[in-house]
Image (spheres, rainbow, N blue to C red):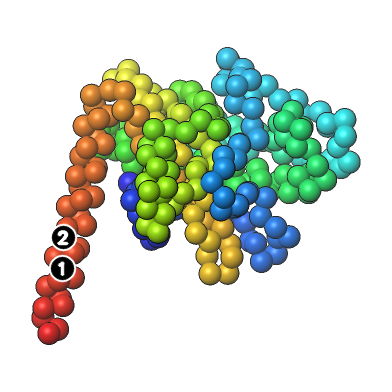
């Protein structure tokens, strides 16, 4: 859903694509790993250590013991509603760096790029929310949905991601073999009906722009754990098939007219 141009592997996965918001012509290097080898990278945020009051990681704003330079402690407010009155806040660069330190990744290079990493982290989650909204509009026309809670599941492949990796292993010339570098499960609340809907989000690195700037591919869809979500997934898949057939028919008609 929300697909843009991509290579055939990404087209089969029907993701949405988002160019990196960072100006890589000015940056020294992109801090997000784009290693084409099929290994799982992990989001540095410790999503298992969660504050039950706000579903955010319990991370200090104090500088790490080995930290050589100060980092901002301000947090960006997202566009994602948590309840009728508040929105979710993203971690500050200092909290993000502390998450890296908890995983033993607090290097001078990481310190240099941590603010850029936070920008990319926030940008990707904003794009994921836009994709969730597209799905929600199909089944719930009101505009008051909220992100009730979420869980990062880095290193844990979704069934769909496993399927595409198997397809890539069987037909590497057609399908991508690179696994997602992160996975989130988001639970959306529909206030007017009281329903909660779980979404699965796989975060991929897509083929870069011609100038080398990275592109990210998000595969956002409702989890197959309710009748309503199953119906929506089938409806969207069917629409995509019919749209492809219509485009093929138009192309064939145009070719016949030209000949």
In this rendering, would 203 be left or right of 191? right
Distance of mark 2 from mark 1, alpha carbons?
6 Å
Q: Indicate the position of residue 64 as horizontal and vertical percent values.
A: 83, 31
Disc 2 + disc 1, Cβ < 8 Å = yes
**In what element is the residue under mark 1?**
helix
Q: Which residue is mark 1?
A: 250
Q: Indicate the position of residue 114 as horizontal and vertical percent values.
A: 72, 44
Q: Which residue corresponds to the image point at 58% horizontal and 69% vertical from the top-left?
A: 211
Label placed on residue 147: none
In this rendering, would 195 be left or right of 188? left
The one nearer the camera, 7 or 235, is 7
Q: Which residue is mark 2?
A: 246
Q: Residue furthest front?
A: 170
The one nearer the camera, 114 or 160, is 160
Q: Quadrant of residue 58?
A: top right
**In what element is the residue under mark 2?**
helix
Disc 1 residue crowd, few under 14, some 14–19, many 20+, Cα 10 Å: few
Q: Quadrant of residue 50?
A: top right
Q: Indicate the position of residue 136 as horizontal and vertical percent values.
A: 32, 35
Q: Residue furthest top?
A: 52
Q: Quadrant of residue 200?
A: top left
Q: Indicate the position of residue 202 as horizontal and vertical percent values.
A: 46, 39
Q: Which residue corresponds to the image point at 53% horizontal and 69% vertical from the top-left?
A: 210
The one nearer the camera, 119 or 14, is 14
In this rendering, would 226 be left or right of 217? left
Q: Is residue 148 above or below residue 132?
A: above
Q: Which residue corresponds to the image point at 50% horizontal and 42% vertical from the top-left?
A: 180
Disc 2 residue crowd, few under 14, some 14–19, many 20+, Cα 10 Å: few
The one nearer the camera, 92 or 246, is 246
């Amino acid at each position: 859903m929300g697909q843009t141009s991509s290579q055939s592997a990404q087209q089969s996965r029907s993701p949405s694509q988002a160019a990196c918001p960072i100006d890589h012509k000015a940056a020294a290097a992109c801090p997000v790993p784009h290693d084409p080898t099929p290994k799982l990278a992990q989001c540095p945020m410790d999503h298992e250590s969660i504050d039950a009051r706000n579903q955010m990681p319990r991370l200090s704003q104090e500088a790490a013991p080995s930290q050589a330079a100060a980092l901002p402690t301000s947090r960006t407010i997202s566009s994602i509603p948590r309840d009728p009155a508040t929105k979710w806040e993203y971690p500050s660069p200092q909290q993000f760096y502390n998450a890296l330190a908890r995983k033993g990744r607090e290097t001078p290079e990481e310190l240099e790029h941590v603010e850029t990493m936070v920008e990319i982290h926030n940008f990707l989650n904003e794009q994921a929310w836009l994709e969730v909204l597209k799905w929600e509009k199909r089944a719930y026309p009101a505009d008051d949905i909220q992100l009730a809670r979420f869980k990062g599941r880095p290193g844990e492949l979704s069934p769909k991601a496993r399927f595409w990796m198997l397809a890539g292993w069987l037909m590497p010339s057609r399908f991508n073999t690179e696994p997602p570098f992160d996975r989130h499960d988001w639970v959306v609340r529909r206030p007017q009906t009281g329903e909660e809907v779980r979404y699965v989000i796989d975060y991929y690195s897509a083929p870069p722009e011609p100038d080398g700037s990275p592109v990210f591919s998000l595969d956002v869809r409702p989890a197959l754990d309710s009748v309503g979500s199953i119906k929506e997934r089938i409806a969207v898949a069917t629409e995509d098939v019919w749209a492809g057939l219509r485009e093929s028919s138009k192309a064939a008609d145009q070719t016949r007219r030209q000949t």
